[in-house]
Image (tube, rainbow, N blue to C red):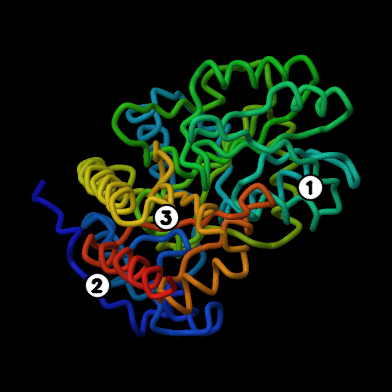
Amino acid sequence: MSKIDFDQKIDRSGTYSLKYDARQRLFGREDAIPLWVADMDFVAPEAVTRALTVRAEHPLYGYSEYPAALYQATQEWFLRRHHWHIATEHILICPGVVPSLHATIMALTEKHEQVIAQPPVYFPFFSAVTETQRELVVNPLVLVDDYYQMNFDQLAEQAASGAKMLLLCSPHNPGGRVWSEAELQKLLDIARQHQLIILSDEIHADLVFTGNKHIPLASLAKDVPIVTAVSASKTFNIAGLGMSMLIVPDSEHKKAIESVFNSWHVSAANPFSIEATIAAYRHGDDWLEQLLVYLQQSYEWVKQFFAVHLPKIRVLPLQSTYLIWLDCQALLLNDKQLRTFFVQQAGVAMNPGVMFGDAGSGFMRMNIAAPRSVIEQACQQIITAWENMQ
């Protein structure tokens, strides 16, 4: 495969891009460099674009069903990339991971039952619990030597006290952790002991850097009720097409989740999401390998840049995702001041850490899935803005 030019700048104006077109509404200025919502400013794999073009040339866009090729491509991808055997009957195709969180919680827990989240964590975890009238229980991660760790003792106490489900983010967003097999096994031991259901969001499973290995939680145990959320969306920059999958080995659990989706009368069965996912999983390996190299180089550049020019901003280690977790506590700004500084003074739009729970206070999340020149410009603007404040 030819070399992908990830340095190429793509004009996204006129494409109704949330990342770009919502800047004025969400950040108060339309010229801020958008390093926030988790999509990439890189072209999707050529095979995906080609598959979509071929399908678009057929002038009928009616109702679709899920072909065997979609299941097969998914199974082959996870076997090839993660050594995980997935049975066809365990796959439930869904219209996105966030709706899947809601549907799974509604299907497998009752109102007012306790559901555990581990902040700082992807913020829809919180709303998926509270908006379904369940009780949110927090099991905050602990930052040790710049790496987040789980508080297993507290988690075991919460499970023993009656919590019904744990929402696991693996790999972790926004902390960038890839959980080790030892950590996952300890988690499974707690789940076994207390009949805890685990909903594992593994949407970033493919975006893991050299020296780390993502292990699908469900590949480690068949005696623990695990529901796994996966998707090609983050991996191949096709989130706007709206397709994800739940892997649900328990047939009764799968039936219950499917019933919730059926009651909503929503489906991911549109012809374009089907074609894109098949093409990505069949032909996206080389593109992904090049992407991972580029992202890791961008991370190393950002880490070195702040270490030299503004060490008060600590760049935490990144094992996975393209989302850097910046520890800005040494700037001595509160969360409102941090947001104002980055947006108004520096002209850089990022996600405030407090969005990910109280444990994210003093942090910012930076999306580095953009051409290196854009990342360099954003970082330089941050340095310049800080110097002008002194």
Decide which of 300, 181 is in the foreground and name it: 300
Quadrant assignment, res 127: bottom right
Q: CA distance from mark 2 to mark 1?
A: 40 Å
Residue 369 position, x and y percent, is: 33, 57
Q: Is residue 157 above or below residue 242?
A: above
Give the residue at mark 2: 10
Q: Is 46 positioned to the left or the right of 344 in the image? A: left
Q: Residues within 10 Å of mark 3 (few under 14, many from 20)?
A: many
Residue 238 position, x and y percent, is: 39, 59
Decide which of 390, 227 is in the foreground and name it: 390
First of labels 3, 1 by sequence position: 1
Residue 181 position, x and y percent, is: 50, 18
Disc 2 + disc 3, Cβ < 8 Å: no
Residue type highlighted by circle 2 = Ile
Q: Secondary structure at mark 3?
A: helix
First of labels 2, 3 by sequence position: 2
Q: Secondary structure at mark 2?
A: loop
Decide which of 179, 18 is in the foreground and name it: 179
Query: Residue visible at 44% across and 38% down?
Result: 205
Residue type highlighted by circle 3 = Ile
**Where, quadrant-wise, is the C terminus in this rendering?**
bottom left
Q: Is residue 381 above or below residue 139?
A: below
Q: What label does residue 142 carry, if any?
A: none
Q: Residues within 10 Å of mark 2 (few under 14, many from 20)?
A: few
Query: Residue visible at 50% across and 28% down?
Result: 179
Give the residue at mark 1: 106
Q: Is residue 201 visible?
A: yes
Give the residue at mark 3: 274
First of labels 2, 1 by sequence position: 2
Query: Residue visible at 25% across and 40% down?
Result: 285
